[in-house]
Amino acid sequence: MNSNVDVDLEDFIEEIRGLESLEPSEGVDRYLKHRGDEITPNTKEEYEAELRLFEAFCERNGIDDLNDLSGRDLDDYRNWRRDESAEGGPLSTKTMRDVMYLLRNFVEYLVSIDAVPADLPGKVTIPELKDGDGVRDTELDPERFNRIVDYLGKHEYASREHVVWLLFGATGRRLGGIHSLDLCDLNLDDDDPYIEFRHDPPETRLKNAGRSEGPTNIDQEVVEVLEDYIKHNRREVKTDSGREPLLTTHSGRISKPTIRTYIYKWSRPCVVGEGCPHGSEPQECEAAQERDTAPKCPSSRSPHTIRHTYLTQKRRDGVPKGILSDRCDVSEEVLDKHYDERTPEEKLERRRKVLEELRDDSGGDLL
């Protein structure tokens, strides 16, 4: 046998002997505790939900000790997670990238505590995004968004559901930000009205904690709807901590699932008088029967879709990245990677307009 092979085999045996037994559930618990100071509670919840699926996979496949985890197991998990784990069908490439990046980080942590071989993280394969992957499937056409808001303005004016849609479209913020708003966060009497987003745990949290905080100015049309909602339709209730939420039900602050339901509900074309683009009859379509089944409609969209549309449209309109980053709590790097869908021709046209404006301001001078 080749001497190099002998050395490699000896190193492998020595490494295996140095591993310390660890059950999958304990590994997940230790990882979440290890990351506790680095991530927000919301992110921790997302990580835990994802890694518990990996834990369930291990249990289904008889993996009781992470020492036994192999590259083949990781490949099997990737296939299972993509094709079989979700009720709504196969996961998108974008989602699978997020899943596998987290798994790789988890496995890297396991290496650091002597639970798996050092080469195992390299066996976690990350799917490559093709042009448009994870982008177009999350878009809501701006014209369609405006038609929905117009419909709500005519038929559900200043209702809680109308206000939810307006807030998403006016601010480009995440669901958690809309959910967190209190009456005191609204500054509607100023000449320059704005909404203040605050991280105020444990009742409400923003994704990036204090870094997500800040004012976001709004148009006068939005102010008028908010004032009418507060005057006529808002339930005057307080939470147990004494806060006065903007969006209320009879029992207190509206829940995040309810907000999410409003977006799915009204993004079905059939409920805003547009008919079904999929050829279904409403009385025979499961997705059209109740609001809880609305996500089954191929045309319905999630709250993040509105944020995505807001950010991509503002980029098309030429809003500087720095302004969008501050306004919508998103890094410039993420804006470039996920929210700039302009074609090369659109970018060229935008640069041309900017240069023309600069020349006009300088009196036509080239330099």
Image: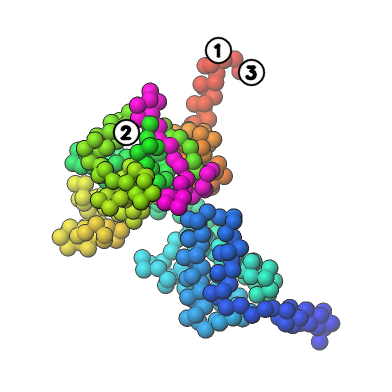
Left or right of 261, for residue 316: right
Label 2 to label 3, Cα distance in Å? 43 Å
Residue 304 locus on image (x, y percent):
40, 50
Name the foreground residue: 254 vs 328.
254
Identify which residue is drawn at 48% across, 60% down: 46
Left or right of 331, for residue 2: right
Residue 10 locus on image (x, y percent):
78, 82
Q: Is residue 202 magenta?
A: yes
Label 1 to label 3, Cα distance in Å? 10 Å
Q: Which mark is residue 363?
A: 1
Residue 98 locus on image (x, y percent):
52, 59
The residue sitting at the top extreme is 363
Q: Amino acid at mark 2?
A: Val
Identify which residue is drawn at 61% across, 68% down: 107
Magenta span of residues: 188-211
Q: Is residue 65 visible?
A: yes
Looking at the image, tell me whether mark 1 or mark 2 is earlier in sequence order. 2
Which-is-in-front pick, marks 2 and 3? 2
Q: Is residue 59 magenta?
A: no
Q: Amino acid at mark 1?
A: Gly
Residue picked out by circle 2: 222
Label 1 to label 2, Cα distance in Å? 38 Å
Q: Secondary structure at mark 2?
A: helix
Residue picked out by circle 3: 367
In the picture, the quarter occupied by the C terminus is top right
Above or below, 98 relative to 239: below
Above or below, 316 relative to 16: above
